[in-house]
């Protein structure tokens, strides 16, 4: 939608809220139950590769948000065949807090994915619910280490100016 003089520019939170109008969110306990079921679920982590190497949900695949669209389609260097072939499967998208995953799931739905969902609260909430994370070697990550990793580190210059 083009901007008009009377409309302020959209913020990140506005884009996430728009995406969530057609994306189902799951809480960590819902995802745990879904993964324990018999239906094949593709778990897609859209964080950056270094974030994924530090800790992720075992069995997830990593496709950074920045290459998602080309990874979801054939004919590109970023193409991930397992992801392209998952259009009819349940795909649960995860990120750190649930925002990037909402945007990614929305994009995937626009690209024809029938059941793309987002993990509400992201891996932060997954860890808060004390569900397991593993590192790049497949070794369990300590919950306290994950708590520290997921703690907000917004610097003062990253905050909006005071009125």
Image (tube, rainbow, N blue to C red):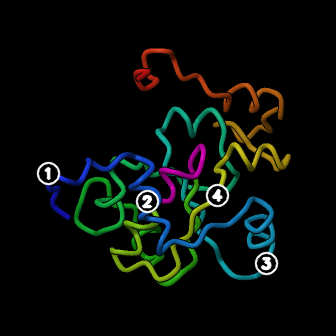
Assess whether mark 1 and mark 3 are in contact (beta carbons under 8 angstroms).
Answer: no
- 4 or 3: tag closer to the N-terminus: 3
- 2 or 3: tag closer to the N-terminus: 3
Quadrant assignment, res 142: top right
Tell me where the magenta segment starts and ends, as one range: 95-103
In this picture, is 149 found above or below 39? above
Give how far apart the Cα atoms at labels 1 and 2 are. Answer: 29 Å
Q: Is residue 51 magenta?
A: no
Residue at left offset 36%, top offset 46%: 11
Task: Identify the residue position indicated by label 4 in the image.
Answer: 120
Placement of the C terminus among the 4 image quadrants? top left
Looking at the image, residue 133 sits to the left or right of residue 7; the answer is right
In front: label 2 or label 3: 2
- 2 or 4: tag closer to the N-terminus: 2
Give how far apart the Cα atoms at labels 4 and 1 are. Answer: 34 Å
In front: label 2 or label 4: 4
Give how far apart the Cα atoms at labels 2 and 4 are. Answer: 13 Å
Assess whether mark 2 and mark 1 are in contact (beta carbons under 8 angstroms).
Answer: no
Task: Identify the residue position indicated by label 2 in the image.
Answer: 104
Residue at left offset 42%, top offset 67%: 106
In the rendering, which numbered label is found on residue 111? none
In the rendering, which numbered label is found on residue 37? 3
Q: Is residue 100 magenta?
A: yes
In front: label 4 or label 3: 4
Indicate the position of residue 81 as horizontal and vertical percent values: 40, 67
Identify the element where label 4 is drawn: loop
């Amino acid at each position: 939608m083009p901007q008009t003089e009377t409309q302020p520019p959209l913020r990140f939170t506005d884009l996430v809220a728009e995406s969530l109008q057609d994306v189902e969110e799951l809480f960590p306990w819902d995802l745990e139950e879904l993964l324990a079921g018999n239906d094949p679920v593709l778990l897609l982590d859209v964080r950056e590769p270094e974030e994924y190497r530090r800790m992720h949900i075992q069995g997830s695949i990593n496709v950074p948000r920045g290459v998602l669209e080309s990874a979801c389609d054939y004919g590109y260097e970023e193409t991930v065949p397992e992801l392209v072939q998952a259009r009819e499967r349940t795909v649960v998208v995860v990120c750190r807090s649930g925002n990037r995953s909402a945007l990614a799931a929305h994009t995937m739905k626009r690209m024809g994915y029938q059941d793309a969902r987002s993990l509400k609260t992201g891996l932060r909430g997954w860890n808060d619910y004390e569900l397991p994370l593993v590192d790049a070697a497949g070794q369990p990550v300590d919950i306290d280490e994950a708590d520290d990793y997921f703690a907000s580190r917004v610097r003062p210059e990253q905050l909006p100016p005071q009125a």
